[in-house]
Structure formats: C-alpha cells, structure tokens
Amino acid sequence: MTELVKVAKANNKLVVLQEPNPICGRAERWNVWPYVYQLNEVAKEQQVPIVKQFSLIKENRDWQSEMSPDCIHPSEMLYKQKAQRTFDVLSATFDSALSKHSS
C-alpha cells in the first residue's frame, strides 16, 4: 500500500485511503483489523487522508444489524453512511485543491 501511495503521489495524484467496514458472522474469521491498523499507519506515514469506516461503524453497539445477511456487505443505509463519510473527507481535504485546477 505504501508503494501504491508513493507512485500515485509521484504522478501528481490526490490520494485518499479508506478503511473497510467490519465484518461479522462466519466472515469474522478473516479478521480485517490488522489491515485497518496498517492502512492507518500508511496514511500517517505518507501524510494522506483516510476515511475512517471500521471504528466508526463499530462504535454502534448494534452495528451487525446494519450489515447484509452475508455479514460482509453493508446494508443500503450503511452504504449511504459510508458514502457520506467519504464525501466529507474528500470535500474537506480536496475542495481547495480541486477548485485551483478548475479555474
């Protein structure tokens, strides 16, 4: 992931990372927490924004009810929440940079 970010930045790309959502049920055996942790480390090291999804979703004690029956994919409502968080980070981070390119 670090190399991907470095290459993107070297090619003048705006980079944002995004945590996955948690998973539950039988899928929990694929523990995504180590990936989430490392993704955040890369974001800090490379100084790029990251959309916090995993921890924010897990703050809701009943987060599993917001997942689809396969316990891997979010429900439509949770997808909307994830999209809003993504939009908020993109807007806060890149609005000024993008407006410079469009002028």
Image: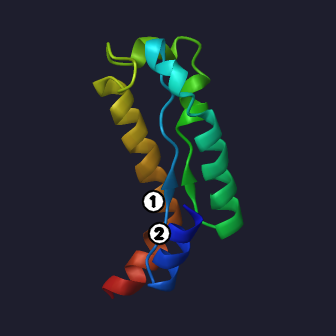
Residue 8 percent location from the top left of the image:
46, 75
Above or below: residue 103 compared with residue 6: below
Dot 2: what SS? Answer: helix
- At which x and y percent is residue 45? 71, 65
Q: Amino acid at mark 2?
A: Phe
Identify which residue is drawn at 55% across, 75% down. Answer: 6
Look at label 1 and name its amino acid.
Answer: Leu
Q: Are marks 2 and 1 in contact (CB under 8 Å)?
A: yes
- Please, what secondary structure does the residue beneath circle 1 have? helix
Residue 74 vs residue 6: left or right?
Answer: left
Q: Residue furthest front?
A: 29
Q: Which corner quadrant of the image does residue 72 belong to?
A: top left
Q: Quadrant of the C terminus?
A: bottom left
Mark 1: give few (<14), some (14-19) or many (20+) Cα within 10 Å.
some
On screen, residue 81 above or below 52: above
Characterize the local packing of mark 2: few (<14), some (14-19) or many (20 or more) Cα atoms within 10 angstroms. Answer: some
The residue labelled by disc 1 is 90
- Please tell me which residue is depicted at 60% across the width and 51% down the height of the picture: 39
- Residue with the mark numbered 2: 94
27 or 78: nearer the eye?
A: 27
Q: Quadrant of the N terminus?
A: bottom right
* Residue 19 falls left or right of residue 11: right
- Between 103 and 12, the one nearer to me in the picture: 12
Q: Residue at x 66, y 68 (%)?
A: 47
x and y, in percent, of residue 51 in the image = 53, 49
Residue for point 64% across, 38% down: 34
